[in-house]
């Protein structure tokens, strides 16, 4: 799995140098605040999705075991008839 280059913390801790006729630092800060918020939301969503994947994989494993047991039971019942 590829990793992101930025995290909310890295964005928050980024500092820019001052340049004559550069961008308005307040506007840049406001935009970065929105980017940080979005990153935090994405990180939370990603963690939740990983949890769901783990739960579903566990459920699949359980269902496969049940299927195998049922197939075995059917074969035994057919052999006994």
Image (cartoon, grey):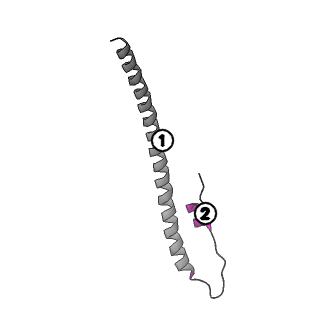
Residue at the far bottom in the pictured view: 21
Q: Is residue 20 left or right of residue 58?
A: right
Q: Is residue 79 left or right of residue 28?
A: left
Q: Earlier in the sequence, mark 2 or mark 1?
A: 2
> In the rendered image, which quarter is residue 52 located in?
top left
On whether residue 16 falls in the magenta region, the answer is yes
Q: Is residue 69 left or right of residue 39?
A: left
Image: 33 above or below 52: below
* Secondary structure at numbered mark 1: helix
Magenta segment, prevailing SS (helix, strand or loop): loop
User: Where is residue 25 shown, x and y percent of the image?
Assistant: 57, 79
Residue at the far left in the pictured view: 81
User: Where is residue 76 shown, x and y percent of the image?
Assistant: 39, 15
User: Where is residue 77 shown, x and y percent of the image?
Assistant: 35, 15
User: Where is residue 17 shown, x and y percent of the image?
Assistant: 67, 77
> In the rendered image, which quarter is residue 26 located in?
bottom right
* Secondary structure at numbered mark 2: helix
Local packing at callout 2 (Cα closer than 10 Å; few below 14, some 14-19, many 20+) is few
Residue at horizontal 61%, vertical 66%?
Answer: 13
On whether residue 45 falls in the magenta region, the answer is no
| Front residue of this view, candidates 8 and 6 | 6
Residue at horizontal 58%, vertical 83%?
Answer: 23
Residue hosting label 1: 54
Q: Are marks 2 and 1 in contact (CB under 8 Å)?
A: no
Residue hosting label 2: 10
Residue at horizontal 44%, vertical 36%?
Answer: 60
Q: Of discs 2 and 1, which sits in the foreground? A: 1
Span highlighted in magenta in the image: 7-24
> In the rendered image, which quarter is residue 64 located in?
top left
On residue 63, the disc is: none
Label 2, label 1: how far apart the Cα atoms are: 28 Å
């Amino acid at each position: 799995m590829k990793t992101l280059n930025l995290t909310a913390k890295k964005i928050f801790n980024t500092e820019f140098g001052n340049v004559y006729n550069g961008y308005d630092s307040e506007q840049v800060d406001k935009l970065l605040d929105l980017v940080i918020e979005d990153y935090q939301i994405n990180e939370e969503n990603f963690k939740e999705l990983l949890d769901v994947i783990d739960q579903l994989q566990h459920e699949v494993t359980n269902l496969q075991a049940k299927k195998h047991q049922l197939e075995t039971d059917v074969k035994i019942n057919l052999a006994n008839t």
